[in-house]
Image (cartoon, rainbow, N blue to C red):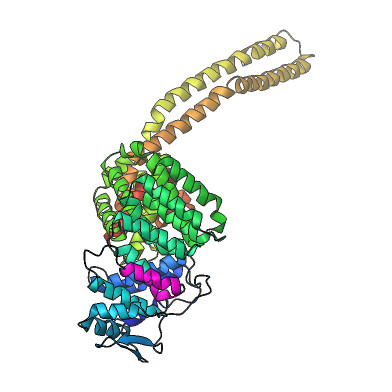
Amino acid sequence: MEEQEPVDWNLLQHNPQAFFGLPISFDRKDLKRAYNVWLKRFKPEQYPTEFQRIRAAYELLESQLRFQRNQELPPEDSIRPTLSDTDPVSLPDNSGHSQEKQSPVEPVAFVRELLARKDREGAVLELSQKEQKTSFEYYALAVLSDFTQSCAEEDSTGFVDWILAGLETHRGDPSLLQLLRAYLREASMNKRDMKRILERIVTIFPNDWFYYLSEPLWLRFVHEVDWSTFVETLQQCDRMIRDPRQYGRLAFKTRLLRAALFRAPDDWCKETLDELEENSQSMNSSLLPEFEIVAGLLTLKQRAERFLSKGPMSQRIFDSMRSYCEDSEEVWQKKIIASQAILAANPSAVLSEFQYTDIEAKDLVLPWIIVSSEVREQLGFVDESSESPQAYGNATISLLQEIDRSFAYSKITSNQRHKSLKTIGTAALSFLGVMLPGTILTMWLSSGINVRTAGASMILGTVVLLVSLLLSIGAVVWAFRNPIRRIEALYAQRLSKLLEEHYRDKGRAMVSRMLAATHLSFHDLLQVAFQCIHQQELAFGVSRVVPQYMRQDVGLWIYATAVRFQR
């Protein structure tokens, strides 16, 4: 997309799907791909206002995708489309009488004109007394109420009440639906109002739509009230739902579990996770990544004490993932970026805390890796190099050869040589012990024989000697089969231990330096390393096993993710 191409911001507001150039049936990958294109043009640090508008539209489409709401309206009989340019609007005049204003109607100008009236209360009264109001008139009443309601009138009809009243009449109006979600996400309100609004929404939408509309408020409600009030309100609303469909409920419970994870009791978290798992087949495919992240975070929470004991880098990862659950997206994204910068600047600390043999840590940091990758994509982090991972093949070969050269082979043979010589000496003595009787017997049979019988005696002696030789070889092999196997096992064990020590002490640091220099992803570097070993196997020594160690190295995995944030 060229920079000179004009941007239709009006299209972004009214038809974000068309703004992003998405097909009718788009999926999460399509949305992320289109979003990243715009991020490359409007980077958040250079265009903060434009970025926020694009981000808000992305979040709207992402929510619709999670709840499968992009192609569906509430299943009610009284569905009315949003106000068009030809809908009649009753505009009160200064005398208090209303006049019907026909097309064209410009919504913003209409509200401004009402606000410019000296008698705003009269305008509100005039509109509120109409028996049949359009969806936009409810919106106008909501806006006017903010300018006419006094602080003392706590029980008077406010902004959200007019929006909800409009939805009672126009349940399928997309503008009112979006406006309600935006209000519930951003408006300040006390605990009592939160509970009241949630209970009213469920009376208007006692179906799967309730979860989509009320989700922004639930994500705030769970952190504002005590846990018993939250659970009681949630159960009360759930009992009022009369809808066999599950995907809205599953999308809501997935996001709610994430928000409540570090505050809720483990029993509630486990029960909710089990419910999601049981209905995973009905789950929207766009929910699966978040479901896997939440499941991993629950495990991280349960093993938090052991994880945090690793050190300060583990503490940063844990705090960032808790922020991912509890804070706004802007806050937790900034926290992840700051943590990645610290991880990238301290490779030795990362590798020290996360040993490559720590299999448990790999499961615990998996959510961190997934969320970090998504943040990197959403904020437009792109690699400057256009080269494919295979272009780093020569650098990878040099790395493996350097690991080979730095390995001290003499360490393997010092103790092993002593054990091998001892075993060989014992085997030789045993061999002679079996062969000696056969040799003596052969010599005795051959002694004192005349020429006439020499031929038969020599043949007999030779046969006895050969049989003794075969028996001695078999006896030695049978007697020393277990010691030989133990020697081979000890040799392999010793070699494996030395290789692991070498990889831990030197190899990991060498690989981390290459990651910092190339910014390759961990998966790409691992793939290139395996290809190099396969194609030039004879060119490497002990470094042939390095990719196998890398594959289970959680410390390198974390570091590789961090350094990719540096571009």
Quadrant assignment for the N terminus: bottom left
Between 198 and 398, the residue placed more toward the observer is 198
Q: Residue at x 46, y 50 (%)?
A: 235
- Residue 397, compared with residue 108, is above or below; it is above
Magenta segment, which residues?
Answer: 159-178
Quadrant placement of the C terminus: bottom left
Residue 91 sits in which quadrant?
bottom left
> Which residue is farthest top?
448
- Residue beneath the point at 67% across and 22% down: 470
Q: Position of residue 523 (x, y in %)?
A: 42, 55
Residue at 38% in and 80% down: 130
Query: Which percent across, then down, holds residue 222?
Result: 35, 51
| Horizontal arrangement in the rendering, residue 276 relative to residue 259 (left or right) | right
Left/right of residue 488 with respect to residue 58 in the rendered view: right
Indicate whether 200 appears above or below 460: below
Residue shown at 69% from the left, 13% from the top: 442
- x and y percentages locating residue 190 in the rendered image: 28, 56
- Which of the two residues, 330 or 317, is positioned nearer the viewer here? 330
Name the chief secondary structure element in magenta.
helix
Camera-nearest residue between 314 and 162: 162
- Left or right side of 276 for 408: left
User: Can I make out residue 521 in this image?
Assistant: no
Q: How many marks?
A: 0
Percent coordinates x, y for residue 418 in the rendering: 43, 23
Residue lying at the far left of the rendered structure: 118
**Viewer can see residue 314:** yes
Whether 277 is among the magenta residues is: no
